[in-house]
Amino acid sequence: MQNWSFNDGVARLSRRSPVTGEVAGERTGSELEFVRELGGLLLMHKFAVDELLTKLRIWSEEFDYAHEHDPIEHIASRIKRPESIMQKLRRKGLPVTLASARDHLTDIAGVRVVCPFVSDVYLIRDLIRRNGMEIVQTKDYIAEPKPNGYRSLHLLIRVPVHLSDRVEKVTAEIQLRTIAMDFWAAVERKIFDKSGGAPRPEFSGELKAAADAAADLDARMKGLHELKALAREVVPDGIEGLGGEELPAR
């Protein structure tokens, strides 16, 4: 674990971020000053991610133990790099200042939760709502997919961060999607984002068809999951484990 305090770390922060570990490289004087000021904000967003990850991991283990079904397949998180923050502020035509980043950027902290089934996506959303985190914005691309077929549930939430002397509510972005949705999004990003932006028109139909196939797979797997749950209710535990052998005659 990296030990860092703002008071004695300001000089080092111009070379390496305490949160991301990123080497600053060549920067102008104003950029270096911005990065120095950014340290506290990035650390606060790291704390928000830590709070959220703790809750998600607890729910994952609890449901796996109590219900024999883990609604979370895996979790990824990130804190936006200083360079990315500067670039986004410039794209928005905003001043590159600490106040501007704090007031206008809502995705400095990001968490992605991948779930086995669509029902698990909405379960996690409801758990977030019921456990002290305010949902301030919802974009449901599962109910209304993007034109290219992208599906996911995007939430902006305020995470209470309990410091030694106060509680700060920090905004974080969370994406919730199924395994099939995550596969489609990851491959789409590798194919098209790396090659310079949006796909050519002749690819759009195939891309949408692939997204529809992923949605169909989600529906089929949901059906299998429900059939298995129904079978467990009908067949008592213990009989299922007999492996089809005949019961002894009485």
Image (spheres, rainbow, N blue to C red):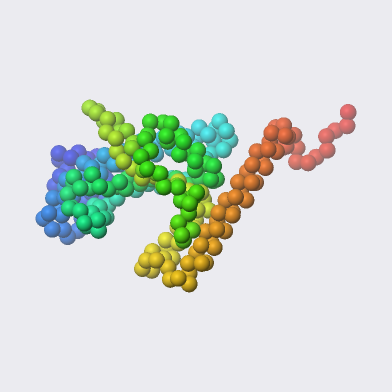
**Residue in the image at 37% along x and 66% along y:** 197
How many marks on residues? 0
Q: Nearer the viewer, residue 25 or 79?
A: 79
**Residue in the image at 29% along x and 35% along y:** 169
- Regarding residue 97, the answer to whether it shows in the image is yes
Where's residue 230, x and y in %?
Answer: 68, 38
* Residue at the extreme left: 29
Q: Quadrant of the C terminus?
A: top right
**Residue in the image at 42% along x and 34% along y:** 129
Where's residue 168, x and y in %?
Answer: 27, 33
- In the image, taking residue 64 as reference, residue 231 lies left or right, namely right
Q: Nearer the viewer, residue 214 or 16?
A: 214
* Residue at the extreme right: 250
- In the image, taking residue 172 as reference, residue 202 lies left or right, namely right
- Picture quadrant where residue 190 is located: bottom left
Q: Quadrant of the N terminus?
A: top left
Where's residue 179, x and y in %?
Answer: 51, 50
Q: Nearer the viewer, residue 102 or 59?
A: 102
Q: Nearer the viewer, residue 29 or 16?
A: 29
Q: Reply above or below: 230 against 34.
A: above
Where's residue 199, x and y in %?
Answer: 42, 68
**Residue in the image at 47% along x and 39% along y:** 124
